[in-house]
Amino acid sequence: MALLKLENVWKRYGEVEAVKNVNLECEQGEFLSLLGPSGCGKTSTLRMIAGLEKITSGNIYIKGQLVNDLQPGKRNIAMAFENYALYPTLVVYENIAFPLRAKKLSEKEIKKRVLWVAELLEIEDILYSKPKGLSGGQQQRISLARALVKDADIHLMDEPISHLDADMRRRMRRELKRLHQTTGMTVVYVTHDQLEAMSMADRIAVMNNGVIHQIGTPTEIFNHPKDEFVAGFIGSPPINFLESRLRVEKGRYAIEVEKFLYFIPDRLGKKVEKASDLLGGRVRLGVRPGDIALSLKKVDNALSGKVILVEPVGESVVYHIRLGEKEIIAEVSVEEDINVSEGEGIRIIFNPDRLYFFHPETGKSLHT
Amino acid sequence: MAKVVLKNVYKSYGEVKAIRGVNLSCEEGQLLALLGPSGAGKTTTLKLIAGLEKCDGGEIFLNDRNVNEVSPFERNVAMTFENYALYPHFTVFENLAFPLRSPRRRHIYSEKDVRKKVEEIATLLGIHQLLDRRPTQLSGGQRQRVSLGRMLVTNPDVFLMDEPIAHLDAKLRYFLTGEIKKLQKRLGVTTIYTTHDYMEALAIGDRVAVINTGKVLQVGSPDEIFNRPNTEFIGKLIGDPPMNVLECEIVKKEKNYFLKIGELIHPLSARMAEKLLQEVKDGKSRVGIRPTDMQVSREKIPGYPEMEVYVSEPLGDKEILTLKKGNVSIQAKIKAGLESKVGEHLWVKFDFKRLHFFDRETGNRIHLDVEYLVL
């Protein structure tokens, strides 16, 4: 049985349904991320796991025990929040030591743990300062440190590194992941930042409007999005969506996009065909910027467009391309770049193995 | 349209020296991106150009005219601030009309002129259907257009944009910088744009000026800034993850040269090693390696070093590896698919042609000008 299990969990605040029938399991030692935009219900879900919010209906189990009515203090969890909730009168050392003193550990053990976590989170130099006057990023790391020193069945974290600057956030991401992998702690991690979820989590639950859209490994989520929301939320630059029509042309499957005809692999065409029949052929095509190649020469099975903007971003080049009435984004690595200028006509080639098709109304994938 | 030139400009606030001898020029119709961390002096530079602050020393020219003593109004520049700063209680129309109804302009524009001008700008930006809405009812992209429109209504010669899209959803960035750049090209208005985000600066700037502690460190095309950073600071400011910069030493064993980075020993071409030794007598410097400029392999690469995976982060189509050897830690960014595990050993081979060297004391780039490097 999973260490943590949510069964048909709902949360209503008056009329507002914040969490709608969430089912979720987290195994011992797993790093599970709840990912979604603000207001998607991820924080409410985490707070219900912590016991800080009452469940409207459904069940939550920790280690097989129903905890719906168990106080937060009795759930054996550790928490780090976006807003730090530090004790203003205590120095940083004492703030971090606080949960350990409550557990009546020896001074020696407390010191060992505090120094260990202070080094990990790079706050050794402020251990004897009071929280007031420290930067938001420092305060957030103290809050995270306090959660990490505690032995707990589950570590719950709500945007724990959101207030750090980019460089520190990168370092903390690394250290948190390493810590998880070397200690086997169980983590439920809430974030709106796809990079954080992708880089650290074993599995990601993508949420929107109180509903889980997909649960899977980072690779699954990126390569096999179940719907348009997931496809659009993950990936930077974001995926391009194009209205298209599936047809059979000379015995081969093709899609009509912005008045161009583009042949697609049979295997994919077959999968999409059945669903698209009901839609009169209408399907929404999704193609990631990194799965588009550009060519100045004439190529078979390519679309034609015009480059309207070139953005050299260092290791890659981002092209904004006019394709019929639409504008799409392509990202080409520097080694593969062909140096096209603004205003030039260009041939566009989609990677045939990495095309996505979605239902134009429901947004559901037509082939996963 | 105007050319903007700053000559040896200084500005202090009390004890704090915000701008320390800035020389900068932005050609007519060009978009110059000012890139630097917070506190670098970017906003102060814009305020000096706008005339919202007076410089303590140096000269500012707009179209070859010294404007040090010219009022902000008469400089005819328009400035936007971080996150648009729209008036929340005004409609889009009122926000756009605001600069035209200011005390300085009120006598120039009748209410009829104001309506005409606002509608013209709103049509240009494709926001005419939003004129009755309030900013809170707009998307991020629409808000940006209103903010741009408010700059445009006065027909300025120069646009000054201070972190216009900071703190917005990263995904919107691609569309918003694109919109700004397209509009700027279409109108051909000279524009200076500040940001702390290197991607934004490279993406949007015709040229990029890197600024820190009140000084301009390098001005160049996005390509130059990325491929030939003048200093270690610039190297590390750009890239995600940033450039690895490590203490190194050239060592010679028998006839072969090696780059020694702590416990990491990596072959180095004789031409590069000898060039470097001409520049740095003791062979000690700091090497810069971009995470993308290396090959990482599970198969042994004979003669090349082996490193241990400290942590690996998948990012969809890419994977970031943190690799260690002794006290040396480097980051590599590779195509997805390796799926390495913590503790695993991998072989690493740097792309020679793309190594950067910096002086240990000054942090300045050591120019090697080696074109063909053969191992």
Image: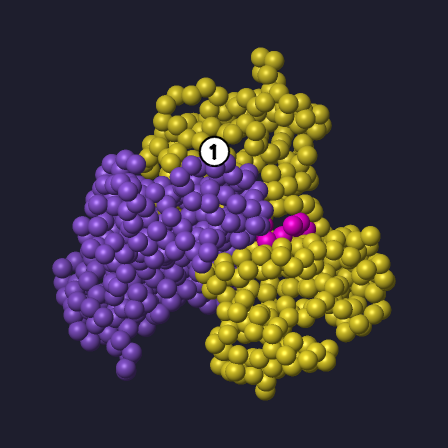
| Amino acid residing under circle 1 | Ile
Residue lying furthest bottom in this view? A89
Q: Nearer the viewer, residue A225 or A281?
A: A225
Give the image location of residue A82, x and y in percent: 60, 68
Q: Quadrant of the N terminus of chain B?
A: bottom left
Q: Is residue B314 left or right of residue B280?
A: right
Q: Nearer the viewer, residue B351 or B72?
A: B351
Residue at the spot 26% in from the left edge and 40% down from the top edge: B255
Chain for colour purple: B
Residue at the spot 34% in from the left edge and 43% down from the top edge: B267
So how many labels did they put on this image? 1
Q: Is residue B301 left or right of residue B230?
A: right
Residue A202 located within the stretch drawn in magenta = yes
Residue B82 located within the stretch drawn in magenta = no
Q: Quadrant of the C terminus of chain B?
A: top left
Residue at the spot 63% in from the left edge and 38% down from the top edge: A224
Give the image location of residue A29, x and y in percent: 70, 55
Q: Is residue A154 in sight in this rendering?
A: yes
Q: Chain of mark 1?
A: A
Q: Which residues are magenta?
A: A198-205
Image: B47 above or below B295: below
Q: Nearer the viewer, residue A359 or B76?
A: A359
Residue lying furthest front in this view? B254
Image: A26 above or below B186: below
Residue A50: quarter of image? bottom right
Q: Is residue B144 in sight in this rendering?
A: no
Residue designated by label 1: A292
Give the image location of residue A247, x and y in percent: 61, 21
| Colour of the chain lettered A | yellow
Image: B17 above or below A330: below
